[in-house]
Amino acid sequence: MPEPSEQPLATGRRFDTVLIANRGEIAVRIQRTCHELGLKTVAICSEADRQAPYIKSADNFLCIGPSTAGKSYLNQDAILLAARLTGAGAIHPGYGFLSENAAFADAVERAGLIFIGPTALSIATMGDKIAAKRAMMAAGVPCVPGPDTALPDDLVSVELVALDIGYPVIVKAAGGGGGRGMRVVPKADQLHEAIALTREEARKAFGSPSLYMEKFLQHPRHIEIQIICDGHGNAVWLGHRDCSMQRRHQKVVEEAPAPGIAPEIIQPVGMACVEACRQIGYRGVGTFEFLYEDGAFYFIEMNTRLQVEHPVTEMTSGVDIVRAQIKAAEGHVLELTQDGVTCDGHSFECRINAEDPDTFLPSAGVITRLVLPQGSGIRVDTHIHAGYKVSPYYDSLIAKLIVHAPTRAKARARMCEALAGIEIEGIATNIPFLRALFEDHAFARGETDIHYLEQWLKLRRAA
Ligand code: ADP
């Protein structure tokens, strides 16, 4: 199994204790690799998470605030204080919460600690989707048609931008994320309202009214490329994932590799991503997200953190991505070369959510019975157990079911079997919905795009 980053560097960035500034399945996932590396872990929690299993398995823990995330998992001062009190030398932010907050990454490093992620500057550049697009265009990465500048205030000029791109267009908040802060504009007469609504949403949700516009692609797939960089000019890409199965721009199922993409088509895109990382001096792991339509790739954004769907790449590449992230943060030189990256077989991930399978409304409560699938090629990343109380305060993701098999067809069959083997009682989950989706013929053939799932749900509701 290839493992990146073996050679220690005398950078003075060594640490022996990692504070994991997150919760749920990703806190468990990060803790596992830290312990494998011989690192001690500090768990932090809100009052709602005091009984979570990873609190007990951490070497140390601190409750840092009340259940509301704003007062706990997003409380930068409390997290920094927890690190100081527990002697942690590094902070792993996981995903969500503070993971893409440049000010937090900066505050961590200023406090003399190591942020397990890229530099604050990289996060800030890539967090502004307009700046990211500009940087990618400069590095020769293909982007969705549309200017790499913010929309002007004057609506007549905005109309000209839209006419130049050609309808339909999509208006997006420069600071947007999580599928929010974007609006499709099918025709010119809807432009003014779309601009006003998105600007207001952007101001409220992301603290900046800055918007940009690009072509709305009608039937693309979402394909992304995982990269690892050491910050010393060495970078590799670990193959690709398809995350086209989305509801409300949020991923539901992911797979690696993206089906039906010829190596000669994706190869130059992967190499352009690696080159872009070198040009911006990127350190750590990251993901370049693309839309893929009619044989062409268009960059949409870069995520400067570990992603929910990283396990499908771990299953196909054999690389522990969290380990690579920690080693890069320590200053190790990447040992893995592009020639050493091999991607074998096929992997699927299902996001198991505590939500009604028909209405998708969150379902909080106590899990009264839990049976998880086991067997060759099956991985479950989770923090739940029988008796666990699913809190209404956070994201509804309670587990990730990941399978791996030699071919896509075999991996799909394995996922169907694994989904049938899960029993969760006491709360509602989206498992019945996932089971139906994995039986769908178009999905089985890999013939879907980012709009497919919404259309499929509409047809199911109508039936
Ligand atoms: P976020 O940061 O909120 O995740 P992204 O820019 O990554 O936003 O876009 C999320 C999803 O929105 C994409 O996966 C895709 O489904 C849809 N999307 C974004 N840009 C476009 C576009 N130009 N055309 C069509 N769909 C788009």
Image (cartoon, helix red, strand yellow):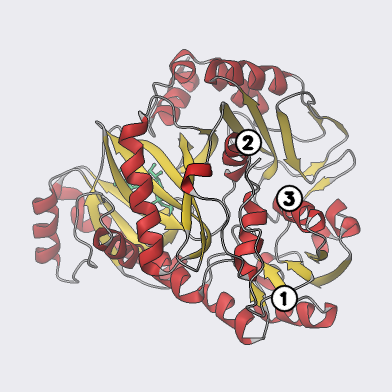
At mark 3, the secondary structure is helix
Q: Residue 461's spot in the image, x, y percent? A: 49, 22
Q: Distance from label 1 to label 3 (Cα)? A: 19 Å
**Disc on res. 315:** 2
Q: Residues within 10 Å of mark 3 (few under 14, many from 20)?
A: some
**Disc on res. 235:** none
Foreground tag (1 vs 2)? 2
Q: Which quadrant is home to the N terminus?
A: top right
Q: Residue at x 89, y 56 (%)?
A: 57
Q: Is residue 407 visible?
A: yes
Labels 1 and 2: the sequence-earlier one: 1
In this rendering, is residue 160 above or below 189?
A: below
Foreground tag (1 vs 3)? 3
Q: Residue 268's spot in the image, x, y percent? A: 31, 43
At mark 2, the secondary structure is helix
Dot 1 and dot 2 residues touching (CB under 8 Å): no
Report which residue position mark 1 lands on: 79
Q: Residue at x 51, y 73 (%)?
A: 119
Q: Residue 176's spot in the image, x, y percent? A: 41, 60
Q: Residue at x 80, y 26 (%)?
A: 374
The three-letter amino acid code for the residue at tag 1 is: Ile
At mark 1, the secondary structure is helix
Report which residue position mark 3 lands on: 29
In this rendering, is residue 96 above or below 98?
A: above
